[in-house]
Image (tube, rainbow, N blue to C red):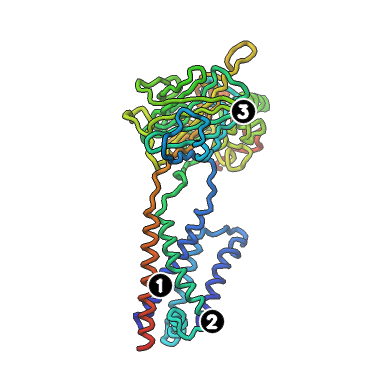
Amino acid sequence: MKPANQIIRQVLRGGVGVLTAMMLGGGTLSFAQESVSVRATLMTGGVPVDDPNAAAWSSAPPATFPMSPQVHWQNRIQEVTVKDVIVRALHDGKQMAVLVEYTDPTQDPDDAAALEFMVGDKKAHFAHGQPMLQVEGGPVNIWFWKNKSGKAVDMNAKGFGTLKAQEHQDVKAKGAYSNGTWKVVFSRDLSTGHAEEDVQITPGQFISIAFAVWDGRKDGAGDLVEKGSQKAVSSWWYFRADAPPDYSGYMYAAIAAALALGFQFVLIRKLKKGQSA
Amino acid sequence: MGALGKPIILMVGMYAFLKFVLPNIPGSAPLPSSLIFLYLLLTASGIVIFETLSGESKDAFWGPIQRFLTGENIGGLQALRYGVLILFPLLVGWQTYGSTAVSDLPPTESRTIHPAPPGEYTGLSNPVPKTPENIMQGKGFYAAYCSPCHGGNFDGKGPAARGYIPSPANFADPTTIAMLQESYLFWRIKKGGVGLPIEGAPWKSAMPRWEVELPDEWIWKIIMGEYDGAHQSPRTWE
């Protein structure tokens, strides 16, 4: 019977389609998740904004980023203490906290760390949003913590020399030093009322983040070795706050499987009828 | 199953050829899976057209498939039939799930590594005479200003390089300065990371804007020292 043949052809075409999709999909499934992004894990209950040693941090996957001496602009530095930062993040849908951990052999009053984000849709150069010569870039939002002040400063910059504390201070920070390791937690609400100045964090969306660290040690003459632009820096990486779990994919999968099953059933029935006819 | 045997062998053989044999032919490269699929699809269509040319061959081709699906007189293949009937809906479901799931991967970056320079930086020739003294001086400037990132061995592995990703250019690699003109290097050294156009985004280049600190003559000498030290020659159009 002719219709039966056509149906079979359709089934074969569908089957081949599925196999293809598997072949194509297989390529993307095998990607290992390297440290290219910080993932803020969604949690319930309070985000540990004041506690760099809270148990909750163990539920956040750590990401390690290499650091370099800042060489882009004067004054440069050729060697820095901190070689890597390990970063974890948590959020509860309202507040977020980022834990930056790094090795520093001495605890000094001038030890400091900072996070940097792009603000709005415009891209920015990772070095303080240095003005680009051919394109107009955007500003950066910098969250700066220093050991001796014990708090964070929420700042903006659009190029070296333009760093300025905001009127609205929305960021908190707390550091804890033990066994040659700093753990500094920065926290803020995911969104603020100042989208022109502050990075706005939408769960599920990737944004850009960079890191800076100053070892506040002094040299023989009593001068700070790392200060201002003389610091350890990273270039841009990604940050994403996890979106709430979405189970609709399972539902669509179930519907598709049910349709395929029904299709098979109808097809075989038709074929059987055709044979007996 | 006689009429189906040959097509199956043909498909398997074709796949094996595309996947394992073709990439090993000199001058060839592994095929992307999308291309392999396209070729297999063409092969399958060819088979179907060929097998359905005449009424007899059509029945010989579709007959076994029909019998398999209806499960009549297939004996030992009954278990396989159930397997296929169960697996197919599951595959469709899995595939649907895969295509609706949100990716965990960050956005792909389509950075242009060597974007076009502004017009005034094309076709400039090095005004500094290529003498051993000038090359030596260029290498001295290189050691002072460039080697912390680009490395004393011109390999991009200087002590300050580790945190900068993408890594500082490795001049000994034949795909960097060897395929660029001196004029291009002059632009990149002078303007640095902030001189990149939008195609160069996401602007992770820490390359300083050396025009602020070094006279042009020094930059031309550094270029000379770089080519010499890395044992490369500038690209020319002759």
On the image, the x and y values in percent for residue A76 come to 55, 22
How crowded is the residue under tag 2: few (<14 C-alpha within 10 Å), some, or many (20+)?
A: few
- Decide if residue A77 is in sight here: yes
* Chain label for disc 3: B
Question: Mark 2 is on which residue type?
Answer: Gly
> Of helix, strand and loop, which one carries label 2?
helix
Query: Which quadrant holds residue B107?
Result: top left
Q: Is label 3 in contact with label 2 (beta carbons under 8 Å)?
A: no
Task: Work out whether A119 lies above or below B12.
Answer: above
Query: Which quadrant holds residue B120?
Result: top left
Q: Residue at x 55, y 75 (%)?
A: B9
Location of mark 3 (residue): B148
Quarter that holds the N terminus of chain A: bottom left
Location of mark 2 (residue): B76
Q: Residue at x 41, y 28 (%)?
A: A141
> Of helix, strand and loop, which one carries label 1?
helix
In this view, the residue in front, B80 or B62, is B80
Q: CA distance from mark 3 to mark 2?
A: 72 Å
For residue A11, the mark is 1
Q: Residue at x 62, y 41 (%)?
A: B173
Quarter that holds the C terminus of chain A: bottom left
